[in-house]
Amino acid sequence: MTTLKLNILNKNYKNLKKIYSDKIDSKNKIIVKYYKLNTKKPEICPFCKENHEHIHIHGYYSKCLKNSKIDNFTEVFNIKITRYLCTKCKKTFSDKFENQYQNYRITQNYNDQILEDFNKNTVLNDLKFKYKLPFPIIKSIFKNHITISNFNKIKELKSGFVEKLSIDEKKIGNKFYTFFIDLDKKQVIFYCEGRDSGTVKKFCDFYGKNFIKNIKTVSIDMAKSYNLGVSKYIPNAKIVNDKFHVSSNFYKNYVKKILENEIKKQKKSIKTMNKTPKTKKILMKFQKKH
Ligand SMILES: [Zn+2]
């Protein structure tokens, strides 16, 4: 299954020509595939626009990009890229591998795999470990996905109906996003910026009346804005405060306050203790030990 999928995906990289056999590092779970970027010598210099007579091969360099995840293995492409020199303007330039994702050391395919996973599982932190990428990159992929808005994928779901919906907010960077999740399929079916009742309206506008009519329950945290939005735009659905949200809200409102009060009390008592030189000495000794 996986090899078949990979072959199809690699077909998109028309310009890659295999140069060495694969290297498998089973200790670090990496498969390295060696390619050469097979492009023609440029017709003109991108800087001074002189013709090809002035352009010469100036050497090679290799670029390593993560391309896919196969079971626990990471497939890495080691791509040999040609560097050119223009003898007229003395500037160097090289071929571009078009399937690199932005300036990150990953391919477009890797990016697609992450997003596919993201649509099944919204926990960005898990993706960081699975794909061995720093969190800022995962966040950037996600943000980019939201702004480009991969609506085609979401629209496919329009044909089916969702009975159990869950609404949740997540903070990414400085912004809040609202997620709409099909609880039966555990899939994100819609998301947008913001966390007010207007986000529920956006979701309803997107899917249309027939779809909204079929939603039986909506699980939300105890946020007033979602409660307002759901009762206004999904009036037929029953609102459920799900267990996890109830407990986290309980923590925020009660446990945290109790703890904070307790810490304040302790700080006060330490301050009064500090006033006498004897207790100061004892405290110093205590702090040194711990
Ligand atoms: Zn030039």
Image (spheres, rainbow, N blue to C red):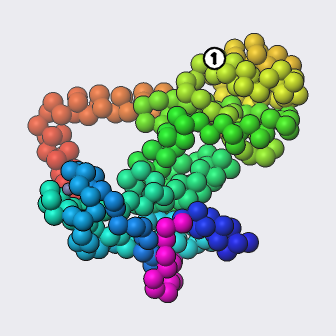
Residue 135: percent from the left, percent from the top? 43, 51
Q: Quadrant of the N terminus?
A: bottom right
- Magenta stretch encompasses residue 26: yes
Residue 194: percent from the left, percent from the top? 55, 24
Residue 15 in sight from this viewpoint: yes
On the rendered structure, is 192 left or right of 43?
Answer: right
Picture layout, residue 154 above or below residue 176: below
Which residue occupies 34% across, 33% down?
Answer: 266
Q: Residue furthest bottom?
A: 21
- For label 1, the crowd category at 10 Å Cα-Cα, with few meaning under 14, some 14 to 19 and many 20 or more, is some
The front one of 58 and 19 is 58
Q: What residue did someone put label 1 on?
A: 198
Magenta span = 14-32
On the rendered structure, is 178 left or right of 100?
Answer: right
Residue 72: percent from the left, percent from the top? 58, 72
Disc 1 marks a residue whose amino acid type is Gly
Residue 185: percent from the left, percent from the top? 78, 46
Tell me: is circle 1 under 8 Å from ligand 1.
no
On the rendered structure, is 39 left or right of 272?
Answer: right
Which residue occupies 45% across, 78% down?
Answer: 34
Q: How many marks?
A: 1
Picture layout, residue 209 above or below residue 251: above
